[in-house]
Amino acid sequence: MLGKSRSAILTVALLCSALPAWGQDWTQRLPDGKGKETVAAICAGCHEFFSRLGAGYTPEGWRTVMRMMINQGTPVPPDQIETVTQYLIQSFPEKPKPAGMTIPGSVEVSIKQWPVPTPGSRPHDPLATRDGAIWYTGQLANVLGRLDPKTGRIKEYPLKTPHSGPHGLVEDQDGNIWYTANAAGLIGKLDPKAGAVSEYPMPDPGAGDPHTLIFDPGGILWFSVQNANKLGRLDPKTGEIKLVTPPTAGARPYGLAVNSQGMPFFVEFGAPKVGSIDPKTMEIREYPLPDPGARPRRIAITSDDVIWYTDFARGYLGRLDPATGKVTEWASPGGPKSEPYGISAIKDVIWYSESGTKPNTVVRFDPKTEKFQAWVIPGGGNIVRNTSVTREGNFVLANSLVNEVSLVEIKGAPTR
């Protein structure tokens, strides 16, 4: 790899994940065309990523991916950028995806969208804060962004460590914005008033990819470390970080939520399981899901402390009652390849996005009636990885590949 940092490897993987899994000699089997040699040189060290079969990209998508790579310092010669882009567009077009479905119902919404200012930012996680703002992580621009939905004004805050890969977001009681630096192996805190950033490195160098984070009622910060297969807690008063490993090897802890009793729950993206962690002892309990192919990715909790999850791999919405272990599942409207992803509970109604359909969708599921309603996202969405809820009870999305933040305003939205 020609890049010099772990984050550059991550970025090139975005490109290479869209190329076929041809093994060690893949560069010799690239389709002929102008730009082939440059692509082979840029990706020459990332064949290990080819187990992640990609679905290709649209022309607009490939241009965004190229911009992401450039943001991260991937050494594409300036005079080769357009040539490489055209080669990728022609050689690896987007594969067919399930159609995003509109399902009528009684709820009315309007969807507002704002492009973020830095091209190729890859907005990853959104966060609706108490002051009415919407924040986002500009993962490949190394910024946190703040949007004022009333004016459309966006301010971006540069982070301390270059190419840190900001990922998850959460607000503390003082209005500070905490984030996971997924490529730098640390937790960060931004003071929006001063613009100052504090950093808390992982105590274990093997825990290099902190992922999602959330506060419990006592002010302790909990987070997942996906590929390192760990969960952690950070005490903001002391800066102390403790890490634990789930019983299941390769569990890949992903989404996190805290129930009404202050207990963190998480989903295991590498296994068909949901887990909980005792906030006092850090002991982990796992709840198996009935289908071995289940791969839950994000999680929400309703007021009855029931767990809801999106099964990304199978195209399902799931419900787990931790008190009984009972699991109930519903096929997502977009089908088995719809890739349900970001999810939130709004007044005990479940809202989530299908990230594998074209366009991406916003899906509403009412647990009382067990009925779905769905809307397609204008401009495609592509890809909604996480969601948030405003103080008014509206649904917030970050749309990675189209470089936008969206607000789904729900008519008559209840306060959470």
Image (cartoon, rainbow, N blue to C red):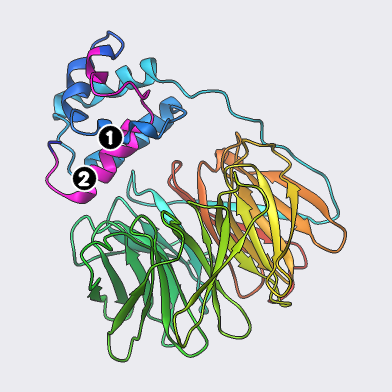
Quadrant in which the C terminus is drawn: bottom right
Question: Is 258 on the left-hand or right-hand side of 135?
Answer: right
Query: In this rendering, does residue 151 appear at all?
Result: no
Q: Which element type, helix, strand or loop, lies under badge 1?
A: helix
On the image, the x and y values in percent for residue 96 come to 57, 23
Front-most of residues 145 and 370: 370
- Above/below status of 23 relative to 14: above
Q: Amino acid at mark 1?
A: Glu
| Mark 2 element type | helix
The magenta-colored residue range is 3-28
Against 274, residue 399 (above or below) is: above
Q: Which residue is mark 2?
A: 8
Q: For mark 2, does the 10 Å Cα neighbourhood hold few (<14), some (14 to 19), or many (20 or more) residues?
A: many
* Sequence-earlier tag: 2 or 1: 2
**Relative to residue 9, is residue 205 depicted above or below?**
below
| Side of 13 where 272 appears, left or right | right
Asked whether the residues under the numbered discs 2 and 1 touch, taking CB atoms below 8 Å apart as contact, a structural biologist would say: no
Q: Label for residue 121? A: none
Answer whether residue 11 is magenta in the image. Answer: yes
> How much space separates mark 2 and mark 1, taking CA atoms?
15 Å
Residue 25 coordinates in the image, percent (x, y): 23, 18
Residue 358 shows in the view? yes
Specify the quadrant that holds the N terminus. Answer: top left
Three-letter amino acid code at disc 2? Ala
Residue sitting nearer the eye, 295 or 1 = 295
Residue 393 on image: x %, y %: 67, 70
> Which residue is depicted at the point 32% across and 81% down?
193
- Check disc 1 and report the residue beneath it: 48
Give percent across and percent down for residue 339. 59, 42
Residue farthest toward the top in the current orientation of the protein:
32
Q: Residue at x 70, y 50 (%)?
A: 363
